[in-house]
Structures are given as structure tokens and as C-alpha cells.
Image (cartoon, rainbow, N blue to C red):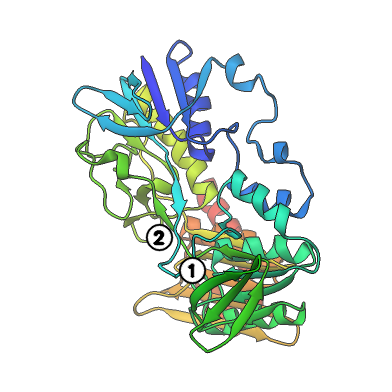
């Protein structure tokens, strides 16, 4: 059996390793688009800070890991997929044949249509090559403009702050990390950053970037002109699917997959940030773009490719855990609530403590928190199990911080039920 995996991120690497486990004799080719060993984008901030060398971002530290498993890592980009002929065209003219194909090509950072966005000194922070360029320019005391305060932007923010740069964050939304926070929580993160010496401009857009005498200047829609030695764009990503044009593989926001990670074409699968997979909370299919989901996608796809469609997914829990200059924020499941649901909220702005619980009847369906890491496991566990809280629902409505007690009571009730 010939397996080909397009993409060498967490989804692709995990799939390759599990394919070898499930099929000891299969031929496995892992295509890496970048000229570097398979690495984790989530480790790039640690490289930016200087906590690890570039090699520390590699997903597997042993240089012989892939060859020892019989996984052929090939550095090549894909230009097209012919699903009927079961062949792949590579940039440069080579072709590869496959029996089973996994598309784990991830996503690419996008730049907004801003004049000057392609100037030297304006970079994304999405690849190892980007990170090397940023390290060269982000010297202590340099003026750095970060466009975007979403999840990825705030991860980069953490690393830049540690480099002692003069940092200004420009975010077009009215709050930071808008896809995992409500207004109260987003405002608290902004206040925290400002108290750390970071300038945060929300409800603000970059209109243009100009260069003169080796220096950059950023103009905003609010009339400000900001000097910059470096501009980093973290304004969003898009799934890498262009090479699938004409392949017959159905693409929406990402590649549409079923409960076994198979696409609309037989023997072609997808996983990770490029896959529009099943969400645990809603049953709907969309791109989650988080590393835990990518890893789980890779394992499930490998099983389906090697062993057949015997294990379907219940869906993956949408979850985010973010460290913003030392302040931990989290969101799980339907953190924004559901129709007909109820919420409980605990707010302590002075101590940067926040907890929000979302209920549907007596079931916890979503939660978010700030500065309260002791509740993370309880939130995730209760949402994933869909446990009925009974009388504990009303107690949590009055005192949300009693979540660990509710979790323990739920676990004990489940144990008693199983013991009968």
C-alpha cells in the first residue's frame, strides 16, 4: 500500500507515525513544503524569545526518527492532484502515485490589501523562515508594530514583549482575541497588556505602510502615524487548498470530510487546519485550526486509511488556551452561549480574574476563563462528557467558582451509575 501525506505539520507527522503502526509494511511518503525538518508553528514564539534554538521547534528531535520508521520525508510542493489517476504533480515536474492520500497541508498566513504590506521589514510570523527574519530586526528598544490581536497575534505578542521591544498592537476589532472572548474578557486582556507597557489600539486599522531612509511608518484610520523598525502581520490565515482545483475534492472553508476524515473522493483524506471536521458541541463541520485537533485528526485519518472505516469521530472539542504576557485565558465549547441557554459569570477586574459558564438546561456546554487556571480541567471534562449537573447547575449559577466541586460530584454520580 502506497500512502502519501501532503503536509509535515502535527497532523501529517502524527498520521505518518500511526500509519506505520497500523501498517508495518506500507510505503509512506511525507511531503514537506518548506526546506526544514517537520516543525511546530506553535513553538516559533519560544524561538523568537531565545528559549530554544531553531532546532527546538522540530516535531521530532532525533534526526533519524523518520528514516528509522521507514517514512520518506521529501521536501516538495504540490501543484495538482489527479484523484482519478491517483497521482500528484509536484512543482518542478515530478509526479507521485498513491493508493491512499492524506491532505494535511495546513494553512497560509494572509496579508490584508494595505499599501506597503510587501515592503522589506513587513513579515508574517507563520514559518521558521519568518521567525529568523523577525529575530534579526526585533532588537531591544526597536519599534515594532503588530497587526492583529487574535489568537496567533497574542502568541507573537508574548514573544515580542519578552524581547523588550517598544510594542504597539493594532487590532481592527473592538476587543482582543475576539474569537474566544466576550467584551468584558477582551477588555481585561487589553488592560493587562497596557499595564505591561504595551500599547494596544483596538477598533483601529492600518491604512498604509511607507518606507523612507531605511525606516518604516504605519498610518492608521484614526489619523495616527507610528514609526516602526519592524511590522508583523497576524491578521488571519486561509486553508491551503488551491492545488486541489479540478481534483473533485469538495472544498468549502476547508476540505469537507466525513466522520472518518475521508473527503468527497474515495481514498483521499484530510486532517488538521485544512480539514472542515466535526465539532463535538454542535455536530457541525468547520475548521478548528488548533494543534490538539490536528493531532487527533491525523491519528483518526491514519486508522481509516490503513484499517478501514471502523472508528468514527464524535467530533473534536473547540478549545483555546492562551498565555498573553503571563495572563492565561481559555475558552471551551460553546463559550458564547446557545439559544435558550443560561450563563453564570464571575468578574474581578482588579485581580484579572474572570469565569463564564454557559448552560443548556443542566448541562455545561461552554466556558471561558481568565487568570483562573484551576478550573481548566473541570470545564473541559464537563463539556466533553455532557454530564447532567442536576442541583449543581443552580449552585454554579450562584457561585461559578464552585466548578471543581460540581465536577467531582458529577464524576462520583457517574461512577455510582456504572457500579450498579
**In front of the other: 362 or 94:** 94
In the image: residue 217, left or right of residue 106: right
Crowdedness of circle 1 by 10 Å Cα count: few (<14), some, many (20+)? many
Q: Residue furthest front?
A: 213
In the image: residue 261, left or right of residue 55: left
Residue at (55, 70) in percent of width and height: 147
In this view, 219 is above or below 56: below
Measured in 3D between alpha carbons, the distance from the residue under mark 2 to the one under mark 1, in whole angstroms, is 9 Å
Residue at (77, 77) in percent of width and height: 196
Q: Which mark is residue 380?
A: none
In the image: residue 189, left or right of residue 336: right
State the image coordinates of residue 169 (x, y, percent, origin top left). Answer: 62, 74
The residue pinned by badge 2 equals 281
In this view, 91 is above or below 192: above
Q: How many marks?
A: 2
In this view, 121 is above or below 228: above
In the image: residue 137, left or right of residue 74: right
Quadrant of the rendered image containing residue 284:
bottom left
Check disc 2 and report its element: helix, strand or loop: loop
Residue at (58, 55) in percent of width and height: 125
Crowdedness of circle 2 by 10 Å Cα count: few (<14), some, many (20+)? some
Residue at (39, 24) in percent of width and height: 4
The residue pinned by badge 1 equals 366
Q: Earlier in the sequence, mark 2 or mark 1?
A: 2
Which quadrant does the N terminus fall into?
top left
- Tell whether label 1 touches label 2 (CB within 8 Å): yes
Check disc 1 and report its element: helix, strand or loop: strand
State the image coordinates of residue 251 (x, y, percent, origin top left). Answer: 26, 48
**In front of the other: 60 or 413:** 60
Question: Can the viewer see residue 57?
Answer: yes
Amino acid at each position: 500500500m502506497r500512502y502519501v501525506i501532503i503536509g509535515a505539520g502535527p497532523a501529517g507527522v502524527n498520521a505518518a507515525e500511526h500509519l506505520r503502526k497500523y501498517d508495518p509494511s506500507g510505503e509512506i511518503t511525507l511531503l514537506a513544503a518548506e526546506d526544514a525538518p517537520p516543525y511546530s508553528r506553535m513553538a516559533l514564539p519560544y524561538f523568537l524569545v531565545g528559549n530554544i534554538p531553531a532546532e527546538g521547534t522540530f516535531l521530532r528531535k532525533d534526526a533519524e526518527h523518520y528514516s528509522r520508521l521507514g517514512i520518506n520525508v521529501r521536501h516538495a510542493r504540490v501543484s495538482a492532484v489527479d484523484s482519478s489517476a491517483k497521482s500528484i504533480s509536484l512543482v518542478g515536474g515530478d509526479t507521485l502515485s498513491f493508493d491512499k492520500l492524506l491532505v494535511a497541508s495546513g494553512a497560509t498566513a494572509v496579508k490584508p490589501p494595505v499599501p506597503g504590506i510587501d515592503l522589506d521589514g513587513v513579515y508574517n510570523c507563520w514559518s521558521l523562515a519568518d521567525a529568523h527574519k523577525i529575530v534579526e530586526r526585533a532588537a531591544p528598544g526597536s519599534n515594532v508594530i503588530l497587526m492583529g490581536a487574535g489568537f496567533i497575534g497574542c502568541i507573537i505578542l508574548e514573544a515580542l514583549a519578552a524581547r523588550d521591544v517598544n510594542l504597539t498592537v493594532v487590532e481592527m476589532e473592538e476587543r482582543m482575541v475576539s474569537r474566544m472572548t466576550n467584551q468584558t474578557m477582551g477588555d481585561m486582556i487589553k488592560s493587562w497588556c497596557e499595564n505591561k507597557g504595551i500599547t494596544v489600539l483596538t477598533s483601529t486599522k492600518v491604512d498604509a505602510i511607507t518606507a523612507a531612509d531605511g525606516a518604516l511608518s504605519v498610518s492608521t484610520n484614526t489619523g495616527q502615524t507610528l514609526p516602526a523598525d519592524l511590522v508583523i502581520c497576524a491578521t488571519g490565515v486561509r486553508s491551503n487548498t488551491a492545488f486541489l482545483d479540478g481534483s473533485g475534492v469538495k472544498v468549502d472553508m476547508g476540505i469537507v470530510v466525513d466522520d472518518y476524515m475521508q473527503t468527497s473522493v474515495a481514498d483521499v483524506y484530510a486532517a488538521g487546519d485544512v480539514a472542515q471536521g466535526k465539532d463535538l458541541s454542535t455536530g457541525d463541520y468547520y475548521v478548528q485550526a488548533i494543534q490538539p485537533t490536528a493531532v487527533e485528526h491525523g491519528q483518526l485519518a491514519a486508522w481509516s486509511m490503513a484499517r478501514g472505516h471502523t472508528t468514527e469521530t464524535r467530533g473534536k472539542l473547540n478549545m483555546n488556551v492562551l498565555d498573553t504576557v503571563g495572563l492565561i485565558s481559555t475558552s471551551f465549547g460553546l463559550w458564547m452561549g446557545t439559544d435558550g441557554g443560561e450563563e453564570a459569570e464571575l468578574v474581578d477586574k482588579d485581580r484579572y480574574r474572570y469565569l463564564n459558564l454557559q448552560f443548556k438546561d443542566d448541562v455545561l456546554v461552554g466556558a471561558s476563563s481568565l487568570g483562573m487556571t484551576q478550573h481548566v480541567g473541570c470545564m473541559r471534562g464537563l463539556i466533553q462528557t455532557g454530564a447532567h449537573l442536576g442541583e449543581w447547575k443552580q449552585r454554579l449559577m450562584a457561585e461559578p467558582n464552585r466548578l471543581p466541586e460540581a465536577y467531582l460530584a458529577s464524576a462520583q454520580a457517574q461512577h455510582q451509575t456504572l457500579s450498579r
